[in-house]
Image (spheres, rainbow, N blue to C red):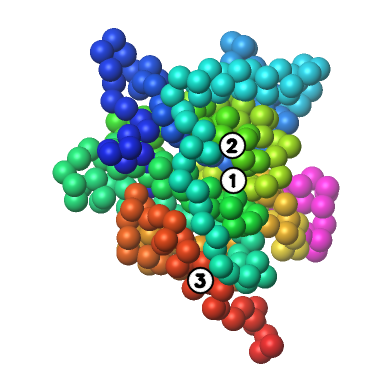
Amino acid sequence: EAMRAAPSRAFVRGLPPGASSPRDVPVRSVRALAHPRAASVDDASTSSDVARSRRGDSPSTTGRKGSFTPARGSASGRRPGSSAQTSSRALETASTAASTSAPSWKDEPAIGPLGIERAHLPRHVAVIMDGNARWASERGVAVATGHEAGVDTLRTIVRCCGAWDVAALTVYAFSHENWRRSRSEVEHLMSLLERTLVAELPSLLEEGVRVTVMGDMGMIDDNLRAAIADAVDATRRNTKLRLNVALSYGARQDIVNACRLLATQAAAGLIDPEDITEDVLGEHLASRTLPAALREPDLLIRPGGERRVSNFLLWELAYTELYFADRMWPDFGEGDFREALAWYAGRQRRFGSRG
């Protein structure tokens, strides 16, 4: 389940008079995003594709729903300087939005020191953001309010990671299976993600957060795909924290897609089947948006009371420590994150050995 802004601190407001769609609604705070191999926005080809769709040219993929299929764009279609133009446009758009709606993260309460030695901290934390709908149901409010409340939690966790030197944060924003939900809920989530990216981009830039997104970008609409490409391009040089968002992502589909690509290469004589190793397969997975040393999470956190991984990073979680919490995602705060990291610091990770 995805993203947050609590009713008492509503970051995404309801439709005001005269607003004809959610995109007309001003957003105060909306958090971050990141993307995969099947259509990695971190790839120049995808950014080129999205830029063309914004200009009104024919994109290589449409905003359709379908099977887990890579969105393919041609790098040769990129005009000289288009990356800089995209980044400039993203900054201008984000700055305009920020000046009217989104406060700087520096205006938020400071994140306190963690008190755990850096050597005992995970370098990469993955989070299944679960419990938004149940949180909303318990309070008698709309499911959309629960998702909006989740945005606030995400912002807090991103800020904590930056303050405590966690190198990478991968969040499960929307699964491949989530497309089965009602059309109204899916449309709200897509709109919320888009508005979050635009509103939060100035703070992400200011705080050194680099955004990547992994998932099937062929299944989302052109506007969200363009917002993702803008955020990825604008934050490309940031180095403090990698914020990797799993969007329209499913691990089983990802592994099958990688196997198909390798099988095609082998059939064409481009690769010897004997040369297909774990590392080679890993290079064809969605998580290649991250550096090789950061692709496997050290710690997975799942709030919301469930005890399963729900088709999330199945290949990458082989040796990940799994932490489950009963608190719903919208209520999961700095203190809960501290407890999870303290629990991790007490684990002995042997990776099959007895050392």
Report the residue at 68% width, 19% height from top. 88
Residue type pointed to by label 2: Leu
Left or right of 231? Residue 130 is: left
**Badge 1 local density, few (<14 within 10 Å), some, or many (20+)?**
many
Report the residue at 65% width, 78% height from top. 351
What is the quadrant of residue 304 in the picture? Answer: bottom left
Across and down, in percent, residue 272 comes to 82, 57
Residue 332 belongs to the span the image colors magenta: no
Residue type pointed to by label 3: Ala
| Quadrant where the C terminus is found in the figure | bottom right
Image: magenta residue range: 262-276
The answer to which of 144 and 70 lies nearer the viewer is: 144
Across and down, in percent, residue 216 comes to 54, 39
Q: In the rendered structure, which disc, 1 or 3, sits on the residue that comes first in sequence?
A: 1
The residue under label 3 is 342
Tag of residue 337: none
Left or right of 326? Residue 124 is: right
Establish if 283 lies above or below 336. above
SS for dot 2: helix
Left or right of 334? Residue 292 is: right
Label 3, label 2: how many angstroms apart (C-alpha)? 26 Å
The residue under label 1 is 243
Report the residue at 22% width, 38% height from top. 142
Label 1, label 2: how many angstroms apart (C-alpha)? 10 Å
The answer to which of 209 and 267 lies nearer the viewer is: 209
Tag of residue 204: 2
The answer to which of 294 and 332 lies nearer the viewer is: 332
The answer to whether residue 315 is visible is no
Q: In the rendered structure, which disc, 1 or 2, sits on the residue that comes first in sequence?
A: 2
Q: In the rendered structure, which disc, 3 or 2, sits on the residue that comes first in sequence?
A: 2
For the residues bearing labels 1 and 2, Cβ distance under 8 angstroms:
yes
